[in-house]
Amino acid sequence: MLVVKRNTQKLLLGVAGSIWLGSVLSSFSVQAASSAAPGSVAASASIKNHSSVTSGLPAGITPYYLGELTTLYARQHSRPMWSDTQLVKAFQQQLAEVALSGVQPQFNTWVTWLTDPKLSGFSRDVVLSDAMLGYLQFVAGVEKNGGNWLYGSVPYKLAAPSAAMIEQWQQAITSGNGAAFIASLAPRHSQYEKMHTALKNMLTDNRPWPKLVLADSLRPGDESNALPVLQEILLRTGMLSQDSAAMPLFNDATAAGNTAALRYDGEMVEAVKRFQHSQGLQDDGVIGKRTRDWLNVSSQMRAALLALNIQRLRLVPDKVSSGIVVNIPNYSLSYYQNGAEILSSRVIVGQPKRKTPLMSSSLSNVVMNPPWNVPTTLTRQDIIPKVIQDPGYLQRHGYTVLSGWTDSAQPIDPSMIDWPMMSAGNFPYRLRQAPGDSNSLGRYKFNMPNTDSIYLHDTPNHNLFQKDIRALSSGCVRVNKASELAALLLQDAGWNNARISSTLEQGNTTYVAVRQRVPVNFYYLTAWVADDGKPQFRTDIYNYDDTVKTGALALSRAGLLLQ
């Protein structure tokens, strides 16, 4: 299972790095002086130094890190830094993956340059080094900034990597440890090699992707002329075997000369169920809009989705010893103790307009029979309109109106409030829902400190867990197996089942401190490779995957570097 990582790699600058940093700063000072006096001898020297790097480059190629490259190659006496072909191949594969993720368009540019047949010799060496500087900045900064870089809609700003990071690279070249250094830049996660292999396999299918067009949902037993297209898609996604595909699609009536449509049944339905399962959809064999949309996603675009989620692995540690992890788009929770999963549960997460945040915290206590103090936003946006339409709404659902949010707040008679005069902006009261069967938090609430007031909780509406798309809450996470989770945590705190049952029956609100704080991590992965070796994809409920549209522009050229 995968979980958001918060520890940040520390890069230390040694004595050699300090000396080199001084030379870099000195060089930059000269360059700054030359830019201040463009007509001076210093400016001419700077231009001459730049030309030693750029003179052989094809037209239209200008290195992004020209100043840094000039300094680096001067230090190397213009010797190539990429003479090892295996080293080049390893780096280009990682570079192609970042380009496909779409997080920064400049990576697409580097991939385009490196697949230009006119680029060769020392000029190619320069472009590889230029791309390496950009990659070093990405690798060094992604753990701290990944929440924005890998989930935002705006590309992050390119900058020069730290002198320490550059020095690590240079020392690796000098000592002959370049291969190990390049390998260390890849995501350190057991999923990486699996996803890398799946990505490469998907890129080999570069034929035009067929489009499945259906006027309505296609159900088992229905007839449709679209079955040949469906069959091709299922074959190319690996959901239908060649042997099954060799079986005739035609029903008896068609074989007898009737030109009626083909029948959707048998192995074709089973293949669709397998496909639905791999997308996290209800595997009923019915091809509705969501299933059809996923069937129309090409292997090439799936490769780009894998590439983006490969970069997200950098925020996700490989092993979980103890703690609770939630993958938001998979609507799943897992609880680990001593490295073993002891509970797995479906969850409901925030709807797109009220997103569940990526976060890391730890459980502090379990609340039995919790009351619900309704957040002001929900009161204004959801409840007030209902009360205006139905004055008896509050009483039926067990709400009390309080004069404010302090401990001394007093109950207010709802009938004394002029509800039609209330609006989203002028409701000064607090709503509290009493514990009970209809309480929105159910029988359990699991508190954890965080700035977003997010927590795990039970729910009285367990029927909603049967839906395949469960982005339905206002941000907090509803747990299907909340009672099982509570039992595990309460038993660790010294409670037995009889005491738990008695407390629930009494109905009194009871807070039980967690004996040892349990880490909780929410993360967001929409693609990975399952234990059976098959890629899994999930619907991007928060539109965090939009960057792959940029990455897709590099598909054909990135594929060349991944061969």
Image (spheres, rainbow, N blue to C red):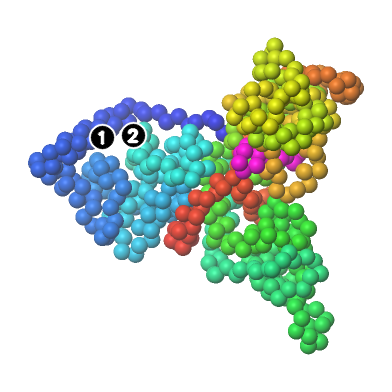
Task: Say which residue label 2 marks.
Answer: 163
Relative to 297, 168 lies left or right: left
Which corner quadrant of the image does residue 292 belong to?
A: bottom right
Amino acid found under the numbered disc labelled 1: Val
Whether pointer 1 and pointer 2 mark residues with C-beta atoms closer than 8 Å, the reply is yes
First to last magenta residue range: 338-356
Relative to 146, 504 lies left or right: right
Q: Position of residue 391 (x, y in %)?
A: 77, 32
Amino acid found under the numbered disc labelled 2: Ala
**Outermost residue to the top:** 408
Q: Which mark is residue 24?
A: 1
The residue positioned 71% from the left and 61% from the top of the image is 288
The residue positioned 33% from the left and 34% from the top of the image is 163
Q: Which type of secondary structure does the marked residue at label 2 adopt?
A: helix
**Along the line of sight, which residue is nearer the eye, 202 or 18?**
202
Q: Position of residue 377 (x, y in %)?
A: 63, 31
Q: Around disc 1, counting alpha carbons within 10 Å, would you say few (fewer than 14), some (14 to 19), or many (20 or more)? A: some
Q: Which type of secondary structure does the marked residue at label 1 adopt?
A: helix
Asked if residue 28 can be seen in this view, the reply is: yes
Mark 1 or mark 2, earlier in chain: 1
* In magenta stretch: residue 62: no
Work out whether 483 lies above or below 225.
Answer: above
Work out whether 290 lies above or below 369.
Answer: below
**Along the line of sight, which residue is nearer the eye, 22 or 363?**
363
Q: Which mark is residue 369?
A: none
Which corner quadrant of the image does residue 363 belong to?
A: top right
**Outermost residue to the bottom:** 257
Relative to 373, 146 lies left or right: left
Q: Position of residue 475 (x, y in %)?
A: 65, 35
Work out whether 216 lies above or below 251.
Answer: above
Residues under labels 1 and 2: Cα distance? 8 Å
